Amino acid sequence: MSRLLSYRFTLLVLLGLLLSVAAERVPGRQLSLAPLLALTVPLWLVLTGLMALYWALRRRRITLLPLAVLVLAWPQVQRGLPLHAAGLRALASGYVSDSLAQQARPGATLRLLSANVRIFNVYAQLRKPDPAAPANFISWLAASRADVLCLQEFYQEPPGTRSADGSLFRVGERVGAESGRQVFVSKSLTNSSGAQFGLAIFSRFPIVGRGEIAFGRLSQNHAMWVDVAGPGPLDTVRIFNAHLQSMSIDESDLVKASSSKAGFESKGRGLLGRFIRGAAARAWQADTLLAHIRRAPYPVLLAGDFNDVPYSYAYTVLAGQLQNAWATTGFGPGNTYHGSLPPLLRIDQQFAGSPWQVLGCRIHTEIPYSDHFPVEAVYELRN
């Protein structure tokens, strides 16, 4: 590669990085290609690093240019690939910052667990690979040390209903009262037999306020919140639980589109259209959610299935106002999607507003009962 061509390629890479980062701030409803361009941020970051290395090996002064850009773009690196020592220790030890929580002021910490439970695999086709998955998942949640659980794609059979599984899906009782937690279920659907679908928050602290946020109409994709009264310094805090628009991408279609030219021609356009429409919906939902968060009278925690990666508009607008738990204390990409789509997808998030301090965050990759891994974090309320 000639020197002139190398210079031009370097400038092209830096321009690509600039445009892709700018695209994170453009909602898909304004520019349909913006979500796709934002997804390329990691590629441009890698190329920028390679160009810095290329010029450094040749001892050229232009090395300073990609290096300076990398320094300025370091928050982008940390967004997708945080490298915190505390996160590495948590991965090695298998717990969520217990030692840090013990050093915090008594009564000033809150442990939050969030999980997309995929209706606890209630349907036979979901539990076929592991018939014991529903019982194991419910038992694991009931035994969790978390103070608050935020669950998406929730399912329960309340008292008075019957199923072939007896009382297996009396989740409100098992994870709630029997485990010392109060519960608020935001129902998006109640079927003919009385079974409930929606979102749920379980809390060991008293629930003193509650509400729902419908994105147009109350569907599976909506948000909810509770105010919980904690002991001592914790006082009252508001916790949001959200499930944003699905990516609407069928895994089999993705496999076909990537396996052959014919598959790409038959499935590629449909996949692209669904992704663009989903990104536009999530952008609007994130803006709506953020408006509610800004009006909250108490310190805020936000958890949920956002169906979007860190390089997206939805993530960007929320991270602009709140700390992301994994990006603040984690180590590595932190994939939360447990399926056959491309790996390293962190689409389940927890965020904290001021004056919360994130003490630690862990992704429970050892819990395989859903197509999402649970996320757990510990927070301290600072003065």
Image: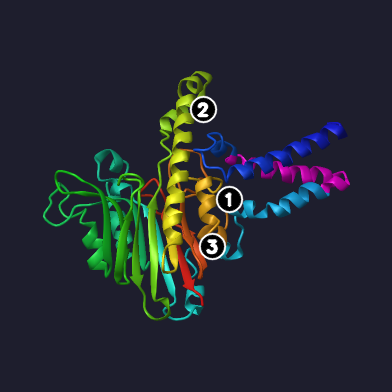
Amino acid under disc 3: Ala
Nearest the eye: 159 or 317: 317
Chief secondary structure of the magenta portion: helix
Image quarter hosting the N terminus: top right
> Which residue lies most toward the top here?
262
For the question of whether residue 381 can be seen, the reply is yes
Tell me which residue sits at (30%, 57%) in the image. Answer: 200
Query: Within the image, what quadrant is residue 141 found in?
Result: bottom left
Closer to viewer: mark 2 or mark 3: 2
Amino acid under disc 2: Ser
Amino acid under disc 1: Gly
Give the mark, 2 or 3, whose residue is nearer the N terminus: 3
Tell me which residue sits at (63%, 51%) in the image. Answer: 76
* Spatial CA span between label 2 and label 3: 35 Å
Query: Is disc 3 surrounded by few (<14), some (14 to 19) or many (20+) residues within 10 Å?
Result: few
Q: Tell me whether circle 2 and circle 3 mark residues in contact (CB < 8 Å).
A: no
Give the extent of the magenta segment. 38-63
Name the residue that disc number 1 marks. Answer: 80
Residue 143 image point, x, y percent:
32, 65
Name the residue that disc number 2 marks. Answer: 258
Name the residue that disc number 3 marks. Answer: 92
Residue 355 image point, x, y percent:
51, 71
Closer to viewer: mark 1 or mark 3: 1
Report the disc number at residue 97: none
**Considering the numbered disc 3 on the image, is that residue within a helix, a strand or a loop?**
helix
Give the mark, 1 or 3, whose residue is nearer the N terminus: 1
**Considering the numbered disc 1 on the image, is that residue within a helix, a strand or a loop?**
helix
Q: Tell me whether circle 1 and circle 3 mark residues in contact (CB < 8 Å).
A: no
Q: Is residue 87 magenta?
A: no
